[in-house]
Image (cartoon, grey):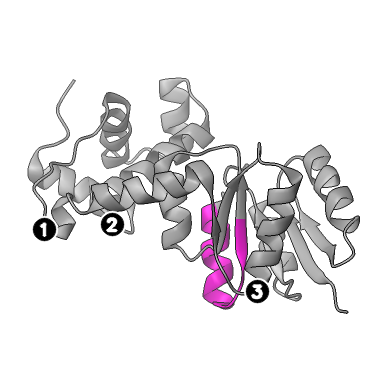
Amino acid sequence: MKKIGVFLVDDHEIFRNGLKQLINSEADMEVTGEASSGEDALQQLATIQPDVIIMDIRMPGMNGLETSTRLLEKNPRGRILFFSLFDEPDYVAAALEMGASGYILKDTSNKIFLSAIRTIHQGKYYFIGEVSDILVKKYLDAKQTPGNGGTQEISLSRREEQIMRMISQGLNNKDIAESLNISIRTIEAHRMNILRKFQVNSIEEAVEYCKINGLLKEE
């Protein structure tokens, strides 16, 4: 019987080693490759096609969502399982929207993790527990957004307003992070949340919308 080939993408070596040991202990699956970053994953997966890709969300450099989007552009049949510490609604919704086959949390049991791999390999989807609840809530909320014919106004947090104002001034992620004394990964997370709120594909579109509708108040 051909084993399920699993590729791991996570920036923590100790965590990857633990997953390898668990997966390789199963009779029907094996780890066929691993990457510590999105860039590394794209390079390796250009020449191999594993059955299931286990993807972290937050990584230095290219994050898991961007990496997965690029992978699926080249191979629309790719099966990606997000395995993350974060259960934020925007992350879960973004993963589903970009074509992920599943999303589970890192505090889940080994049994559930292995079951998710097998389920996704069969061409099915795997979203459980808290993640399923988040998806339902996100769907119901989406029905009330302006882009879907509802009347709910788009609102930005104070931090999101700061970041959007700086982006409109031409500052990059590094400049903004230094100015606000926060990490670049935090800036990236805020940018992702902003794109989800405005339902646009680029931060430039969101900035333009804010300018037209007077959402960027002067401090």
Q: Mark 3 sits on what residue?
A: 122
- In percent of the image, x 17 and y 34: which residue is there? 216
Counting every numbered tag in the picture gives 3
User: Quadrant where the C terminus lies?
Assistant: top left
- Disc number for residue 200: 2
Mark 3 or 2, nearer chain start: 3
Which SS class for mark 3?
A: loop
Q: What residue type is labelled 3?
A: Gln
Marks 3,2: beta carbons within 8 A: no
177 displayed left or right of 150: right
Residue 34 horizontal/vertical position (percent):
79, 57
- In percent of the image, x 37 and y 37: which residue is there? 171
Q: In which quarter of the image is residue 115?
A: bottom right
- In percent of the image, x 46 and y 29: which residue is there? 177
In this view, the mark in front (3 or 2): 3
Q: In which quarter of the image is residue 30?
A: bottom right
Q: Does the magenta stretch include residue 1?
A: no
Q: What residue type is labelled 1?
A: Gly
Say few, some or many: other residues with alpha carbon within 10 Å of mark 2 (under 14 / 14 to 19 / 20 or more).
Answer: some
Magenta segment? 65-81
Mark 2 or 1, nearer chain start: 1
Q: Which amino acid does label 2 sit on?
A: Val
Q: Does the magenta stretch include residue 77?
A: yes
Mark 3 or 1, nearer chain start: 3
In this view, the mark in front (3 or 1): 3
The reply to whether residue 173 is visible in this rendering is: yes
Q: Which residue occupies the foreground of this view, 39 or 91?
A: 91
Which SS class for mark 2?
A: loop
Q: Mark 1 sits on what residue?
A: 149
Disc 3 and disc 1: Cα gap in Å?
Answer: 36 Å
218 displayed left or right of 75: left
- The answer to whether residue 13 is above or below residue 29 is above
